[in-house]
Amino acid sequence: METLIGTDISTAKKLLESGETVAIPTETVYGLAANALNPDAVLKIFKAKERPHFNPLIIHLPDWEAVKKYAAEIPEEANLLAAHFTPGPLTFLLKKRPTVPDLVTAGSPKVAIRIPAHPVTRELLSQLDFPLSAPSANPFGYVSPTTAQHVFEGLQGKIPYILDGGECTVGLESTIVDFEEGEVIVRRKGGVAVEAIEEVLGKKVDVRTGVEDHPVAPGQLKSHYATSTPLYVGDAAILAKRFSTKKIGVIEFGENLRAVTAAFRFQLSPSGSLDEAAKNLFKIMRQADQSGAEVILAEWLPEEGLGRAINDRLRRAQHEAK
Ligand code: TXA
Ligand code: MG
């Protein structure tokens, strides 16, 4: 199959209506989309990504109004969070209506719903009469794509069309929130900081992540978001000594690794901005992976704001993480 990259919304629309997959831009990462109500189309996503079927998918809708069609119940706190963060990088786990195929939720009674903020994909969604299920548009386990070119590198020959919407502005996947008996639980750290959610709700929330590990059988998957080159996170000076015979690539954040000697250097944010680091993280992981470095070193970022989600991705990308 030939994979085209273009900016034509009507091409994407036609392919999706005929049950094909299309890679779409969102503000977080590129998604590999298909008609969420058509199980045969959804199966093509799993196939192109080589993703296990027991890993459920997020469905993407044009606006919060449309959520009622697919969620059986919408807790008050979900409405409150939606008023602040939707459209945007926040995904809601809500009790599903029977219209959502079990394949999409991997048999769970809840469906993950997101209203993406990217103008191209919002326009596309507004022209469709079905939601789009879309995981990140990368081969399962590899670094998520933040440009059309990244998608092409990973899925070339496996999908017909990549809708190019430029570089993703947030750069990390959405934060996933769950609602249980009046409690709000963060299930994945992402593009909306936990602190921002707490501020809107006026209370602390539970962070119980692991939603990305859970659906996968133990041992099946060593790491997620992983580079092919081994990546180590910790005290970079100590790690650099340990790998002194190898060509080292370092992922820097501001001046944090200034004292470490390396063959290749990649900068997340010269000024030390966590938002900028989030936007650049996956691109830089790919650059480091393709640089010729034999080992990639990084240090943990501050555990605040988007730093928490960045650290989560680094932890999962680590060599021998599990
Ligand atoms: O920013 C994002 O969320 C991107 C863009 C494309 O929207 N999508 C994304 O999808 O990151 P994916 O499939 O790579 O990650 C979705 C995560 C998975 O780890 C999955 O386990 C979890 O959401 N998830 C989806 N549906 C779920 C459900 N019904 N119950 C529990 N977890 C769910
Ligand atoms: Mg993913």
Image (spheres, rainbow, N blue to C red):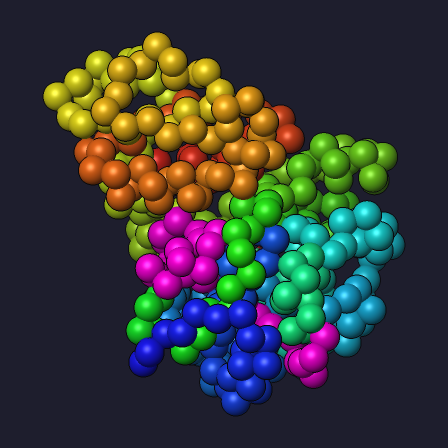
Is residue 2 highlighted in magenta?
no
As drawn, is 46 to the left or to the right of 26?
Answer: left
Q: Residue 208: image x %, image y %? A: 60, 41
- Highlighted magenta segment, given as a residue range: 126-154
Looking at the image, is 241 positioned above or below residue 187? above
Quadrant in which the C terminus appears = top left
Query: Of 195 and 245, which appears nearest the observer?
Result: 245
Farthest front residue?
7
Numbered marks: total = 0
Q: Nearer the viewer, residue 122 or 314?
A: 122
Please say whether residue 209 is visible from this viewpoint: no
**In screen coordinates, is 274 left or right of 248?**
right
Q: Which residue is drawn at 35% across and 44% down?
A: 286
**Could you tell me if residue 229 is visible in this image?**
yes
Quadrant position of residue 74:
bottom right
Image coords of residue 7 (percent x, y): 54, 70
Q: Report the side of 225 relative to 192 (left or right).
A: left
- Residue located at (59% from left, 64% from top): 58
